[in-house]
């Protein structure tokens, strides 16, 4: 039996992969900002197409086409990966739009909220029992969001959509029986027809980026597959090898890096009122983290 202080080699590799994944995700706004002139929906469609090209190469090298065909023929795997593909696409669409319209700070808030969204979903969707500290954490996070609503004059829709779609995607990936590469390949294949039709339509109307932008932008657009698929592969690898609570703790890396970029690189406003909102949410995360670690130690 492994004590709480010990970790198997697989868990160590999983934690390293997840940590690297989240650090890379934190830096992704630097990439998307270079493509601010390209329509966000088109960027996400390109991500689908060029991610698939990379994934098919990896699957071919691993001789894994049989696993992909099997997954596409299984109703449960088809349903789980179809839903996760929709959630992931929605997450990326809102995220890319938010980054390129000057809302990096708000997108970072969304990823800070993900662990608390998971806790709330466990209670209200899966009817799990919550400890008192977890209820307090949800209450503090709700207070932070309410304070931001007062400050902005509207709900922080970007943050809320980012949090809910990524929380749902994490749950689907955790439940999926497929390995990281196979699962991501199936997800991408399921939405490929929609992405391809949209890109062809954009090209037909002359509004598409390919063939109309400079060489540098062409290279960046065609790199979208590598930029987004590599962190997702690391995430899928890590998610299957470490506990969801550990995954939740490592998740704080990405929004912390994004928040730093938004404030110090892109000089987005971070008023005292917004700091107060974040303070409630950080307090909620601290309480959630300490309670989680305490519960694991007691076990």
Image: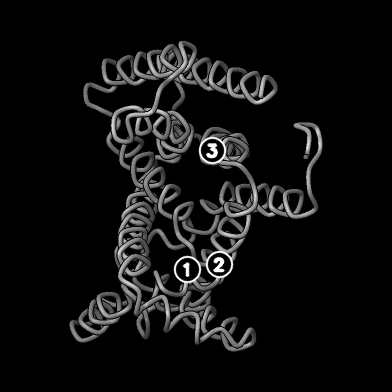
Mark 1 touching mark 3, by CB under 8 A?
no
x%, y% of residue 258? 54, 40
In this orientation, which residue lies closer to the viewer: 89 or 268?
Answer: 89
Mark 1 touching mark 2, by CB under 8 A?
yes
Q: CA distance from mark 1 to mark 3?
A: 25 Å
The quadrant of the image that shows the C terminus is top right
Q: Earlier in the sequence, mark 1 or mark 3?
A: 1
Q: CA distance from mark 3 to mark 2?
A: 26 Å
The quadrant of the image that shows the N terminus is top right
Q: Colour scheme in the image? A: one colour
Relative side of 95 to 67, left or right: left
Element type where label 2 sits in the image:
loop
Seen from this angle, which residue lies furthest front?
Answer: 1
Element type where label 1 sits in the image:
helix
x%, y% of residue 64? 56, 83
- Label 2 crowd (10 A; few <14 / some 14-19 / many >=20): some
The residue under label 1 is: 183
Relative side of 292 to 186, left or right: right
Q: CA distance from mark 1 to mark 2?
A: 6 Å
Instruction: Please count the marks in the image.
Output: 3
At 47% from the left edge and 58% from the top edge, which residue is drawn? 32
At 56% from the left edge and 59% from the top edge, which residue is drawn? 236
Q: Is residue 129 above or below residue 167?
A: above
In this orientation, which residue lies closer to the viewer: 37 or 204?
Answer: 204
Element type where label 3 sits in the image:
helix
The residue under label 2 is: 179
The residue under label 3 is: 255
At 31% from the left edge and 72% from the top edge, which residue is drawn? 191
């Amino acid at each position: 039996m492994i004590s709480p202080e010990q970790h198997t080699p697989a868990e160590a590799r999983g934690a390293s992969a997840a940590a690297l994944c989240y650090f890379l995700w934190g830096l992704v706004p630097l990439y998307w900002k270079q493509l601010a002139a390209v329509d966000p929906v088109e960027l996400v469609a390109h991500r689908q197409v060029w991610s698939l090209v990379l994934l098919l190469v990896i699957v071919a090298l691993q001789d894994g086409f049989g696993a992909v065909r099997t997954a596409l023929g299984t109703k449960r795997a088809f349903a789980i990966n179809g839903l996760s593909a929709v959630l992931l696409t929605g997450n990326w669409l809102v995220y890319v739009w938010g980054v390129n319209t000057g809302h990096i700070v708000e997108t970072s808030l969304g990823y800070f909220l993900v662990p608390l969204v998971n806790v709330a979903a466990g209670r209200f969707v899966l009817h799990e029992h919550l400890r008192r500290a977890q209820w307090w954490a949800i209450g503090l996070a709700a207070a932070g969001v309410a304070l931001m609503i007062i400050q902005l004059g509207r709900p922080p829709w970007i943050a809320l959509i980012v949090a809910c779609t990524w929380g749902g995607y994490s749950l689907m990936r955790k439940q999926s029986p497929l390995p990281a590469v196979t699962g991501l390949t199936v997800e991408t294949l399921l939405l490929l027809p929609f992405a391809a039709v949209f890109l062809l339509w954009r090209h037909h109307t002359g509004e598409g980026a390919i063939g109309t932008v400079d060489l540098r932008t062409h290279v960046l657009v065609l790199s979208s597959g590598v930029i987004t698929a590599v962190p997702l592969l690391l995430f899928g690898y890590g998610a299957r090898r470490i506990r969801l609570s550990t995954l939740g703790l490592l998740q704080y890396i990405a929004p912390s890096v994004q928040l730093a970029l938004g404030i110090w690189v892109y000089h987005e406003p971070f008023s005292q009122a917004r700091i107060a909102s974040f303070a409630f949410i950080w307090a909620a995360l601290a309480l959630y983290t300490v309670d989680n670690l305490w519960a694991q130690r007691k076990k």
